[in-house]
């Protein structure tokens, strides 16, 4: 019998259970059956588990949005894929933390020959996130300063490399000097340790008192006000996550009027909302990997059954780069 992880009730990492399950006897016409080898761990999985983000179905539910593996069976309408294809996905519906899964071909991608299953599962969601943040939501430019929080995290280390490939001067925040060294080695131009340094003062110093035109903030509650203070006139606040907790409600006028700021709260699924966007986004990422502008940064591998341990580690703030679960 195959095994999967389920969220039994909302709460801490301990609510994740490793259980047996039955496969559907018949695959839907537009689905393929995937024998999964690697599953990407993402911060959003902890929001689903704790209830910060609502779950689409009743409990118990299998979490996870990203995995890779091999096609082992085809629905009767499937022509784009064949048995044996190596494939990956980074999209809803949730349910990636399992050994075998049926998945619609509409959000499925073939993995290029030179990219391993582990790399694909570790980088697709975080890498396509950087693609839409840096190429479509706001197009970062050569020699421009940008501020990016948690620069040594999964999304962060990809952002460091992406910014470097464009010649953009990324200012990255981190909580330890070791994380700072790693972000720098991945291409981040300036590092600020937000535990020991004043971020606003440092950003002013680096940018000649002008501030940055854009802040990419995935930390949320703890950095929201700092981010706004670091922006230049008419700057853009991109609030794309909340690893430290939800941003409290704000007074719109007091918050954005003093510098005529812009604000957006984007989601990957809305930037890859159809097949064309998904293919363009994944191809841009894969080409950057193939051209060696971006490399995977898997820093921890857990067995699927250790998902609870993996969540605890990710939320302990001691990880860098990407984490995968292996079946
Ligand atoms: N909107 C989207 O489309 C989208 C897509 C993907 C990811 N995201 C978001 O991007 C962010 C990064 O995701 P990720 O998977 O790559 O995670 P990650 O950056 O590897 O891990 C989160 C990092 O946040 C920092 N952090 C600051 N305060 C924290 C706290 N109180 N507790 C825990 N961590 C804290 C830590 O770095 P330091 O120790 O250096 O502070 C930690 O390593 C998350 O907020 C995620 O939800 C958004």
Image (cartoon, rainbow, N blue to C red):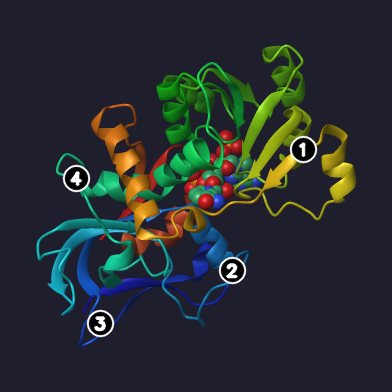
Crowd around label 4: few <14 · some 14–19 · many ≥20 (10 Å): some
Residue at disc 1, secondary structure? loop
Residue at 67%, 28% in the rendered image? 213
- N-terminal-most mark, 3 or 2: 2
Label 1: few (<14), some (14–19) or many (≥20) C-alpha neighbours in 10 Å: some
Distance from disc 2 to disc 4, alpha carbons, whole Å, reads 38 Å
Q: Nearer the viewer, mark 1 or mark 3?
A: 1
- Please name whichever residue, 267 or 191, is drawn nearer the observer in this view of the structure: 267
> Mark 1, mark 2: which one is toward the viewer?
1
On the picture, is 200 further left or further right than 65? right
Please report the residue visible at 71 percent of the width from the left and 22 percent of the height from the top. 197
Closer to the chain start, of discs 1 and 3, is: 3
Determine whether the beta carbon of the residue marked 1 sits less than 8 angstroms from the nearest atom of ligand 1.
no
Q: Is there a contact, CB below 8 Å, between mark 1 and mark 2?
A: no
The residue under the point 20% across, 86% down is 26
Total marks shown come to: 4
Q: Which residue is mark 1?
A: 261
Which residue extends farthest front?
276
Q: For the N terminus, which image quadrant?
A: bottom left
Sooner in the amino-acid sequence: mark 4 or mark 1: 4
x, y (%) of residue 163? 47, 26
- In the displayed structure, does residue 46 sit left or right of residue 226? left
Numbered label attached to residue 28: 3
Residue positioned 72% across, 47% down in the render: 221
Give how far across and how far down residue 281 sits, in percent. 37, 46
Regarding residue 319, the answer to whether it shows in the image is no
Q: Is mark 4 within 8 Å of ligand 1?
A: no
Q: Which residue is mark 2?
A: 11
Q: Quadrant of residue 309?
A: bottom left
- The label nearer to you, 3 versus 2, is 3
Q: Which residue is mark 4?
A: 112
């Amino acid at each position: 019998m195959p095994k999967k992880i389920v969220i039994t009730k909302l709460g801490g990492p301990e609510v994740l259970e490793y259980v047996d399950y039955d496969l559907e006897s018949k695959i839907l016409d537009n689905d393929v059956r995937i024998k999964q080898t690697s599953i990407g761990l993402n911060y959003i999985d902890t929001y689903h588990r704790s209830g910060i983000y609502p779950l689409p179905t009743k409990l118990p539910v299998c979490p996870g949005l990203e995995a890779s593996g091999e096609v082992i069976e085809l629905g009767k309408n499937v022509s784009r894929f064949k048995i044996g294809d190596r494939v990956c996905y980074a999209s809803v519906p949730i349910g990636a933390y399992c050994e075998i899964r049926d998945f619609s071909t509409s959000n499925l991608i073939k993995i290029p020959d030179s990219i391993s299953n582990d790399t694909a599962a570790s980088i697709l969601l975080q890498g396509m996130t950087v693609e839409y943040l840096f190429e479509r939501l706001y197009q970062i430019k050569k020699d421009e300063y940008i501020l990016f929080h948690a620069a040594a995290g999964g999304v962060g280390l990809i952002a460091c490399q992406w910014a470097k490939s464009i010649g953009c001067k990324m200012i990255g925040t981190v909580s330890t000097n070791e994380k700072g060294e790693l972000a720098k080695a991945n291409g981040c131009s300036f590092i600020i340790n937000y535990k020991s340094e004043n971020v606003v003062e440092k950003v002013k110093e680096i940018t000649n008192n002008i501030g940055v035109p854009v802040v990419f903030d995935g930390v949320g509650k703890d950095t929201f006000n700092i981010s706004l203070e670091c922006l230049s006139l008419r700057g853009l606040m991109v609030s794309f996550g909340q690893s430290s907790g939800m941003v409290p409600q704000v007074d719109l006028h007091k918050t954005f009027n003093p510098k005529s700021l812009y604000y957006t709260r984007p989601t990957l699924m809305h930037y890859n909302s159809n097949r064309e966007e998904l293919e363009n986004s994944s191809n841009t990422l894969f080409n950057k990997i193939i051209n060696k502008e971006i490399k995977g940064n898997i820093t921890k591998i857990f067995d699927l059954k250790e998902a609870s341990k993996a969540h605890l580690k990710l939320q302990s703030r001691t990880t860098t780069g990407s984490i995968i679960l292996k079946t």
